[in-house]
Image (cartoon, grey):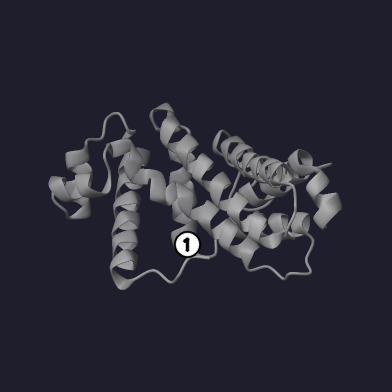
Amino acid sequence: MTGRPTLTQRRREATRLEIARTAAALFAERGAEATTAEEIALAAGISLRTFYRYFSVKEDAVAPLLASGGQEWVELFAASPADLPLREALERAAVASLTPADEARAEMMRWARCLLRDPKLSATWQRVHADSEARLRVALTERCPDGTDPLEIRLAAAAATAAIRVALEQWASSEAPLAGPGSPQDLGARCMRELTAGLRLWERVG
């Protein structure tokens, strides 16, 4: 388990997320290709040098925003009751993380829809997905009894994160709303059930 982040780390992450919001708004409006790092820095109120201290390329500036939902999902799963079956805990956490809690979160998801439609951001999205899978694998390992087959844990993490990725990409490619049929949480629950059905880890751990 990792310790509580320091004040410096929390400030750094807050700055990263603020830059990500700024970049997301610009990318959603103009597209990633038509937006420069200089424009992101100016809109965020930072110098170009500071921008490059946080991100090596402009496309990666939106990674913290794209990753925020996955981070929340893993945190909710890790905090779920110990007696809740793994599959149910994963689905509940996924649905909760895909449900906007307020207007700020809803706006972030609308930005995410635009970002996932932009082919220039595909590599960034794939890295975010891989990082999310790695975090979930750690959380699953901590939740499972000692001696659980690492391959079964890895398969479960891969299937679950793929389910969320497919759900978000399907929603982003449509005009479905943020709630109700076709929404991220609706598709997330459906994809989780379809892609994680039959995994041996559920039989062994619950």
Which of the pair 112/3 is nearer the observer?
A: 3
Image quarter for residue 16?
A: bottom left
Image quarter for residue 156?
A: top right
Q: Residues within 10 Å of mark 1 (few under 14, many from 20)?
A: few
User: Which residue position is annotated with label 1?
Assistant: 103
Image quarter for residue 168?
A: top right
* Residue 153 horizontal/vertical position (percent): 70, 47
The residue sitting at 47% across, 62% down in the picture is: 103
Report the side of 128 relative to 169 (left or right).
left
Secondary structure of residue under mark 1: helix
Q: Quadrant of the C terminus?
A: bottom right
Can residue 155 be spotted in the picture? yes
Can residue 99 be spotted in the picture? no
* Residue 24 horizontal/vertical position (percent): 36, 45
The residue sitting at 47% across, 42% down in the picture is: 128
* Residue 55 horizontal/vertical position (percent): 28, 44
Which of the pair 56/167 is nearer the observer?
A: 56
Name of the residue lying farthest toward the front? 147
Residue type, numbered disc 1: Glu
- In this rendering, the answer to whether 123 lies above or below 138 is above
* Residue 189 horizontal/vertical position (percent): 72, 49
Report the side of 177 relative to 44 (left or right).
right
- In this rendering, the answer to whether 117 lies above or below 200 is above
- In this rendering, the answer to whether 28 lies above or below 65 is above
Which of the pair 84/37 is nearer the observer?
A: 84
The residue sitting at 72% across, 60% down in the picture is: 89
